[in-house]
Every structure is written in C-alpha cells, then in structure tokens.
Image (tube, rainbow, N blue to C red):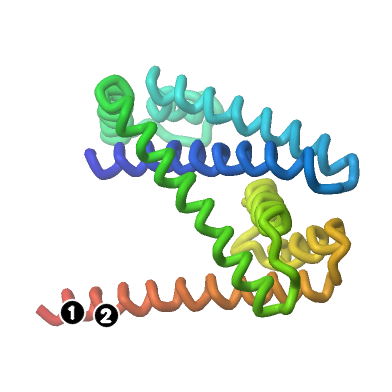
Amino acid sequence: MDLAASISVAKLTQLAGQIAFLAVGLLLVLPTVSLPPPWHAAASVGLAGALALVGALVVLQRRGLFAPLLRFMRRLGFVREHHGIAEFLARLDVEIAAFHRDEGRGLAASAAAFALGWALGLVEVALLLWLLDVEVTLARVVTIEVLAVAFDSVLFFVPAKAGTQEAGKVLIFGALGLDPALGLAFGIARRVREMSWAGIGMLLWWRRQAALSGR
C-alpha cells in the first residue's frame, strides 16, 4: 500500500517538477530567442494547461482519485464489480490524502528534485552541441532542451517516442536557424544514449531475476 501511494505521489511531483523546469525555461527563452509566432502562442497555452492539470491532480489526490475513478468506469461498463479492488483503491486514496496532509514539505522537495533532474539535461545538450561542432551558448542550450521536453510531453502517447524525438529536434534546429541535419544527428545521439541506458537497466534486472530464481 505504501509503495503504491508513494509511486502515485511521485508521479505527481515528477510532473510538477517538469512543468516548473519548463516554466522557468520558457520565461528565459521566449523574450530572448527569435521563434516563429505560433510557437510562442502554443508554448503559452500549453504551459497554462499544464499548470491547470497539476492543480487539478493535487485537488483530486487530496480528495480521493482512484476510488471515484473506479466508480465512474463501472458506470460506463468498462469495469466489473470487484470488492477487493474497490477496497484497495479506497485505502490507497486515504494513504495519498494523508501524505498530502502531513508531508507538504516532502512534496515540494520531491518536485524540486525532479526539476533539478530535468535541468541536468542542459549539460547533455551542451555536450552534444560541442561534439557536433555547433557554437554552445546558454540561450541556445536552454532553448533546445526546453522545446525538446515540451515536444516530448505533448507527444507522450507515441510509443517509445518513435520518430517524434528526431523530428522534434529537426524542427527545433530549423527554427533556431541551424542546419536541420544537425538536429537529426542530435536526436539520434540522444536516442542511442537512452537505449543504452535502458539496456543497462534491463541487463541488471535480468541478472537480479536470475540470481533470485537460482536460490
């Protein structure tokens, strides 16, 4: 129960941290970097919507999210009656609400930690630009990372970001007056890094499972 509650709260603070990073980044980028006018409007509307979403999720988690959602799904006929699930979700809502009530500082600290994690992506952007022999400036680095995170957030529903990551970098580099081919190379390099990291994680998980099964 504690594990499920902590994961639910962590997903909320992760989203809050991401939006905080985007908000600060956009405040720095939009007034100083020349971007197509539609990009400015889309960024402003998207950020406002994301802030509203976080606020709504905070209210729902404090009042109870999962049990009412289960009842709603039952009314639509998507979920059958199952008292065990209903009781579990009701207890989960209580645990999450208690965390919101008693750990306000913990929520803020978690969101801040996630925001810092997103900000560390700036280091990777600077390194990749340097490797691609592109002039590294603070404005350029912040713009590329903020817009890249925004693109990935909007297109979250695409499995494994198939194609969207590379296409997004091509658009961003083109909007900044850089060679779109370098944007494609940037996206591919980041894809290789992500897949390598995921592969290491899967290998460690497989070795752990093998060790447990061998006991």
Up/down of 117 relative to 54, above or below: below
Please state the horizontal and vertical placement of residue 186, each as a whole percent of the image.
70, 72
Please state the horizontal and vertical placement of residue 8, each as a whole percent of the image.
38, 39
Please state the horizontal and vertical placement of residue 51, each as a whole percent of the image.
60, 29
Q: Please state the total of marks drawn on the protein image.
A: 2
Q: Which residue is mark 2?
A: 207
Q: Quadrant of residue 32?
A: top right
Up/down of 60 relative to 199, above or below: above
Of 26 and 5, which appears nearest the observer? 26
Q: Quadrant of residue 50?
A: top right
Residue located at (66% from left, 50% from top)? 146
Q: Which residue is mark 1?
A: 211
Asked which secondary structure carries label 2, the reply is helix
Q: Mark 2: few, some, or many residues within 10 Å (few <14, many ≥20)?
A: few
Q: Mark 1: few, some, or many residues within 10 Å (few <14, many ≥20)?
A: few
Of 207 and 100, which appears nearest the observer? 100
Asked which secondary structure carries label 1, the reply is helix
Please state the horizontal and vertical placement of residue 181, each as a whole percent of the image.
82, 75
Marks 2 and 1 in Cβ contact (< 8 Å): yes
Q: Amino acid at mark 2?
A: Arg
Q: Is residue 185 left or right of residue 40?
A: left
Q: Amino acid at mark 1?
A: Ala
* Alpha carbon distance from label 2 to label 1: 6 Å
Picture disc at residue 133 = none
Question: Quadrant where the N terminus lies?
Answer: top left
Residue located at (53% from left, 30% from top)? 54
Up/down of 58 relative to 213, above or below: above
